[in-house]
Amino acid sequence: MTEKTLHIVGGGMAGSEAAWQAANMGIKVVLHEMRPETGTFAHQTGNFGEMVCSNSFRSDDSEQNAVGLLHWEMRAANGLIMQTADQHRLPAGGALAVDREPFAEAVTAALKSHPNISTDYGEIAELPSEGMWIFATGPLTSPALGEAIAKETGTDRLAFFDAIAPIVYAESIDMDVAWLQSRYDKGETEEEQKAYLNCPMTKDQYEAFIDALLAADKTEFHEGETAGYFDGCLPIEVMAERGRETLRHGPMKPIGLTNAHRPEEKAYAVVQLRRDNKLGTLYNIVGFQTKMKYGAQAEVFKMIPGLENASFARLGGIHRNTFLNSPTLLDDQMRLKSRPNIRFAGQVTGVEGYVESAAMGLLAGRLAAAELSGRDMGPPPGSTAMGALIHHITGGAEAKTFQPMNVNFGLFPPLDGIRGGRKGRKERYKGYTDRAKEDFSQWLEGQS
């Protein structure tokens, strides 16, 4: 183990991006990954950057959306995840969705061919006392490593549950019922404007669907587990339990859509499916994360008009998500205060989403590489998307109520002289993104 070597544990979004950034700064990197030797229930391969829950990086709008701004910043910083996503993108309206298998294969190939990166397959179950390390083990941190982290931090692990949406074979969808359309016909090309499949419901069909959701057999939790869900990834049956109209105002909202088969009829609710691969043979049901048992899922989802004869490439699932109480445990360099030779990155730090995880990996990789090179590097200013996130998890959040967070404009410092409220939102968001791009560009220039 040499002084200039950086060890990164976990080959997901955060670990892959951290390795790429550090290696490009001239640091030798060893990327440790326990898969495929030790698998998880959610992963299918041993590839780096494997996408488990969805194939979407969400909005790509860098002027009016905080996650789109995060895309912009990662591209500006020569991010591997964004580069690869752009190469394997699929039509998804205003979103950035990718063909997930070629995406992961390309991430893996890029890392394995980098002269400064070597790979080591096998589980790391302890926190090393020597060398510089980044732990980016994500929501599926192994039980042994989780116990080691809990022992070191002196706190119980916090947990919520991520739910996986089902995937349907396109050929089994009834296109005499379903139609292709992005909400409000969003997108610059016809392909983008028809990136989603839509299945309409009448009021009676919707009510019957809600009844079936509420009555379906659900996955039981193990002893000692509690159902503390992250609101951005709620199972649909949990949403239904909060009120019968909740889904109709959430993932099943009918606004911005016109039934191509019956344009004069207004649907009471609409189920959307998004293309999941480049071939267009697979579609995932948008927002339909679930903890229903497999048999119940097939029965309930076939109640959706157009999916009566659906065949499923994957049914939904649910898994525990482990994360740190980062505001109390990490410094502003993402180092563990009790062991400053160790950094954490990705979802385990309390950010939520592929993009946010990769962004925290990008920062951790750069900060670690700078430290190994004997340079001082601070995080980006809080006016940027990356800066807003890292400031939130390393001190901006209330430790007692800390929960995983997506990037959002509520984390950004207010702008002077900009109108508040809904009516001033467009101008305000543009102000946030303009300021962030300028500040992030200056931060990058300060490192060269």
Image (cartoon, helix red, strand yellow):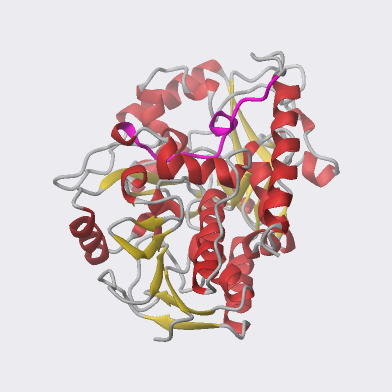
In the image, what residue occupies the spot 41% across and 40% down? 395
Q: Position of residue 162 (x, y in %)?
A: 39, 45
Q: Tell me if residue 421 can be seen.
A: yes
Q: Position of residue 41 (x, y in %)?
A: 35, 62
| Picture quadrant where residue 225 is located | top left
Q: Is residue 95 magenta?
A: no
Quadrant the N terminus occupies = bottom left
Front position in the image: 318 or 310: 318
Q: Is residue 231 left or right of residue 189?
A: left
Q: Is residue 410 magenta?
A: yes
Farthest residue toward the left? 223
Q: Position of residue 31 (x, y in %)?
A: 46, 76
In the image, what residue occupies the spot 72% across and 27% down? 259
The magenta span reads 401-416
| Picture quadrant where residue 104 is located | bottom right
Q: Is residue 19 left or right of residue 421?
A: left
Q: Position of residue 292 (x, y in %)?
A: 34, 41
In the image, what residue occupies the spot 50% across and 22% down? 206
Quadrant the C terminus occupies = bottom right
Q: Is residue 391 above or below residue 347?
A: above
Front position in the image: 138 or 410: 410
Q: Tell me if residue 181 can be seen.
A: no
Q: Is residue 344 left or right of residue 430?
A: left
